[in-house]
Image: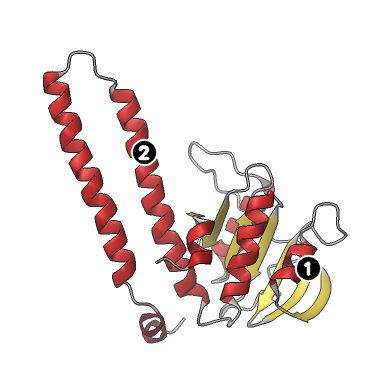
Amino acid sequence: MNKDLLQTQCDFSPMKSAVKANLTELSEEIHRIVDALDHEEEYCLLREITNMRETFAQIESLAASFYLECYLSPYTNKYQDLSDSVQNLSRKQHGALIVVRRETPLDLWIQSGLPVGAELTGSLLESIFYPGGPLHDGAVIIEENTIVSASNVLPLSKRQTEGRKLGTRHRAALGLSERTDALIIVVSEETGHASFAFKGNLYPLNVGEISEGEI
């Protein structure tokens, strides 16, 4: 992607302000915990550590949702349709694998599925991933504002992820992201959690944030 274009499309100030506020609150909480350790004999440190871990996860998700829009908006005008459908798929726990092509050609790395050639809409995307439907397995390929094809097979990553067992969809998302600059969105059918893979890394998404546009 053209770096100047990315900077033009993305105003980092709202995201930085939100993250700074969360970190400030977390810092105050850490000081409170330190003080409590000095003055309270029976203090549940494990509970506080768990709460801090959840806060860090929320901050990561907030930043990831912001960067997702930055990475996608120069390549499709249908970002809102895409984010709304991801939110609906996540809420219903309908598994999904969505590839948005950016600069790198994908033909060398995918096993082609069935042509679609239709304008990207949220309803069409959700219908493709309806459980038991003929196209719900495999990945959808999106180029600009068009759903090019469905039921594509992506290369699987061989990388081991520490502390986490990845399913086939997540391994496929990582596999393609390791070989191209495509952005791949994954929705887990087991948990409904959404994430995206980009340049060999997997990031959690707060689907409420990407739909409501709060950052």
Q: Position of residue 133 (x, y in %)?
A: 86, 57
Position of residue 88 relative to residue 36, above or below, is below
In the picture, the quarter occupied by the C terminus is: bottom left
* Closer to the camera in the image, 56 or 106: 56
Q: Quadrant of residue 78?
A: bottom right
Q: Is residue 155 visible?
A: no
Q: What residue sits 49% from the left and 36% below the top?
A: 163
Q: Give the structural element (helix, strand or loop) at label 2.
A: helix
Q: What residue sits 62% from the left and 57% below the top?
A: 186
Q: Which residue position holds label 1?
A: 150
On the rendered structure, is 35 left or right of 212? left
Q: Work out which residue is located at the far right of the displayed protein and give it.
A: 134
Q: What residue sits 61% from the left and 66% below the top?
A: 84
Q: What residue sits 57% from the left and 70% below the top?
A: 180
Q: Quadrant of residue 75?
A: bottom right
* Closer to the camera in the image, 126 or 113: 126
* Closer to the camera in the image, 96 or 174: 96
On the rendered structure, is 69 left or right of 49? right
Position of residue 97 relative to residue 71, above or below, is above
Cα–Cα span, label 2 and label 1: 37 Å
**Residue 53's disc number:** 2
Q: Position of residue 185 (x, y in %)?
A: 60, 61
Amino acid type of the residue tagged 1 in the rendering: Ala
Q: Give the structural element (helix, strand or loop) at label 1.
A: strand
Number of other residues with Cα within 10 Å of mark 2, as a class: few under 14, some 14 to 19, many 20 or more: few
* Closer to the camera in the image, 23 or 102: 23
Amino acid type of the residue tagged 2 in the rendering: Arg
Q: Work out which residue is located at the far top of the displayed protein and give it.
A: 41
For marks 2 and 1, the one nearer the N-term is 2
Q: Position of residue 72 (x, y in %)?
A: 52, 75
Position of residue 143 relative to residue 201, above or below, is below
Number of other residues with Cα within 10 Å of mark 1, as a class: few under 14, some 14 to 19, many 20 or more: many
